[in-house]
Image: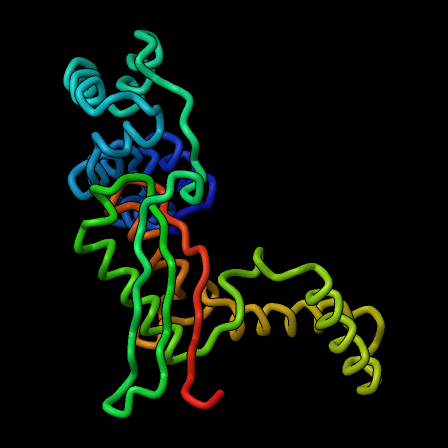
């Protein structure tokens, strides 16, 4: 059966899990919301998700989850009812935890990629899954040479410049005005897929894009992660 984006968003609201894990859970559960929740709870750290969502102390999160009969939504409500929730910053960059991962390519060692990935806690920064994810990013950067982290990070003036180029191409081909916009949008999407790290197909498995790997890492580690910046340094260039 087809899984709707509305169901995925609803499950995310109920569990605070990543979109990728929510889709996987609903697919495995044939759309059954309760079974999907149980699937997620069996594969993702519930306590860390509660902590990430509410800002409550880990001990309070454990207590709330037990007293709510291991119901995530009820645990959230209980935390708020008891005033255990606190205002938290969701931007990883303001927290200052994370790592810079490097990759030196080949025996000749003439190409290096570096990537900065941030998280909320030093516990996650030391986690092997977090470090493995950062290493995959560094490998991808060396292999595929992106220019931007994501399409959201591209300066508007650069987007306008690229659109202008595409418009001239379409006009020179004599395409009808009614389809020109769709053609330009398609070209822009291809530009994102080639130039933006998180929109690129994973060179190890083209059924996934790098944003999927980010979502999976967030689901597994139970807190927000951010790919902040990267660098490609090539000998003689």
Residue at 58% across / 55% down in the picture? Answer: 152
Q: Is residue 159 left or right of residue 104?
A: right
Residue at 39% across / 32% down in the picture? Answer: 13
Residue at 45% across / 78% down in the picture? Answer: 145
Depth check: 90 or 14 in front? Answer: 90
User: Percent from the top left, x then y, of residue 210?
Assistant: 39, 64
User: Percent from the top left, x then y, of residue 132?
Assistant: 22, 61
Q: Residue furthest top?
A: 82
Depth check: 158 or 218 in front? Answer: 158
Residue at 17% across / 20% down in the picture? Answer: 59
Quadrant of the rendered image containing residue 91: top left
Q: Residue furthest front?
A: 236
Quadrant of the rendered image containing residue 224: top left
Depth check: 19 or 31 in front? Answer: 19
Give the answer, above or below, for where 81 lies relative to 179.
above
User: Percent from the top left, x then y, of residue 119?
Assistant: 33, 45
């Amino acid at each position: 059966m087809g899984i709707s984006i509305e169901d995925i968003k609803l499950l995310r609201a109920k569990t605070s899990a990543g979109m990728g894990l929510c889709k996987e859970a609903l697919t495995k559960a044939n759309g059954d919301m309760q079974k999907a929740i149980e699937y997620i709870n069996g594969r993702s750290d519930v306590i860390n998700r509660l902590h990430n969502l509410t800002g409550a102390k880990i001990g309070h999160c454990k207590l709330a989850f037990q007293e709510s009969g291991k119901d995530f939504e009820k645990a959230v409500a209980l935390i708020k009812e008891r005033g255990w929730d606190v205002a938290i910053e969701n931007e990883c960059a303001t927290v200052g935890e994370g790592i810079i991962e490097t990759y030196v390519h080949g025996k000749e060692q003439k190409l290096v990629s570096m990537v900065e990935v941030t998280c909320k806690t030093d516990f996650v920064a030391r986690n092997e899954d977090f470090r493995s994810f950062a290493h995959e990013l560094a490998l991808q950067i060396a292999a595929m040479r992106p220019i931007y982290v994501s399409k959201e990070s591209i300066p508007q003036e650069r987007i306008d410049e690229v659109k202008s180029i595409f418009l001239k191409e379409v006009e020179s081909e004599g395409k009808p005005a009614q389809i020109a916009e769709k053609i330009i949008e398609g070209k822009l999407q291809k530009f994102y897929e080639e130039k933006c790290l998180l929109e690129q197909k994973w060179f190890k498995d083209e059924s996934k894009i790098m944003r999927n790997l980010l979502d999976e890492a967030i689901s597994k580690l139970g807190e927000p992660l951010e790919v902040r910046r990267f660098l490609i340094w090539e000998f003689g260039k």
